[in-house]
Image (tube, rainbow, N blue to C red):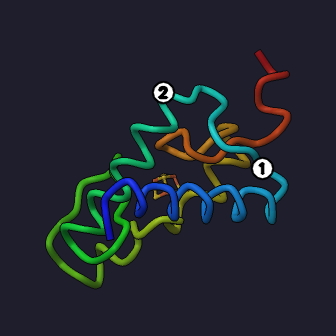
Amino acid sequence: MAEDELEKEILEWAKKYAREHGWTLNPDEKKLDVVIRGLARNRKKFGEAYCPCRLRTGDAEKDALIICPCVYHKDEVANQGSCHCSLYFRTDAGERK
Ligand code: SF4
C-alpha cells in the first residue's frame, strides 16, 4: 500500500474513532498531518501504529501500550483537553482558553 493511502486510511479511522467518542481531531491541519504521517510511518516500519510522540522501548509488551489509540489518551483528553500528540481533542477544549 502506498504511504499516502495508508495515511488516508489512518486519517479516516481516526476521524471515525473521534466521532464515536464525541471528540474531534486537531483542527490545525498541519499538526494533524504530522501525527497521521508519523502513525503511518510507524505502521509501515514496525507493523503497528505506535504513537509518534512517545518513545518505543523495543519491548513488545510495553510498546503495546503506545499503539494508537494508546492506553493514556482517554485520561489525557479528559484532563488536558487533548491527547499527548494533539490528535484527539475534547470538543469543548478550545472554549477553556
Ligand atoms: S497520544 Fe494520541 S496519537 Fe499518540 S497514541 Fe495516544 S491517542 Fe494516539
Q: How many marks?
A: 2
- Relative image position of residue 68 (x, y in whole percent): 47, 65
Q: Residue furthest bottom?
A: 61
User: Distance of mark 1 from mark 2, alpha carbons?
Assistant: 18 Å
Quadrant where the N terminus sits is bottom left
Q: Determine whether the beta carbon of the residue marked 1 sits less than 8 angstroms from the nearest atom of ligand 1.
A: no
Please name the amino acid that badge 2 sits on.
Lys
Please name the amino acid that badge 1 sits on.
Trp
Residue on which the image places disc 2: 30
In the drawing, what numbered circle is on residue 31?
A: none
Q: Which one is nearer the viewer's eye here, 93 or 3?
A: 3
Q: Residue visible at 29% across and 84% down?
A: 61
Q: Residue visible at 34% across and 64% down?
A: 50
Q: Is residue 63 above or below residue 36?
A: below
Asked where in the image residue 80 lies, by quadrant, the reply is: top right
Q: Is residue 87 above or below residue 69?
A: above
Crowd rating for badge 2 (residues with CA inside 10 Å; few <14, some 14–19, many 20+): few
| Left or right of 63, for residue 96 | right
Q: Secondary structure at mark 1?
A: strand
Residue on which the image places disc 1: 23
- Relative image position of residue 64 (x, y in whole percent): 36, 78
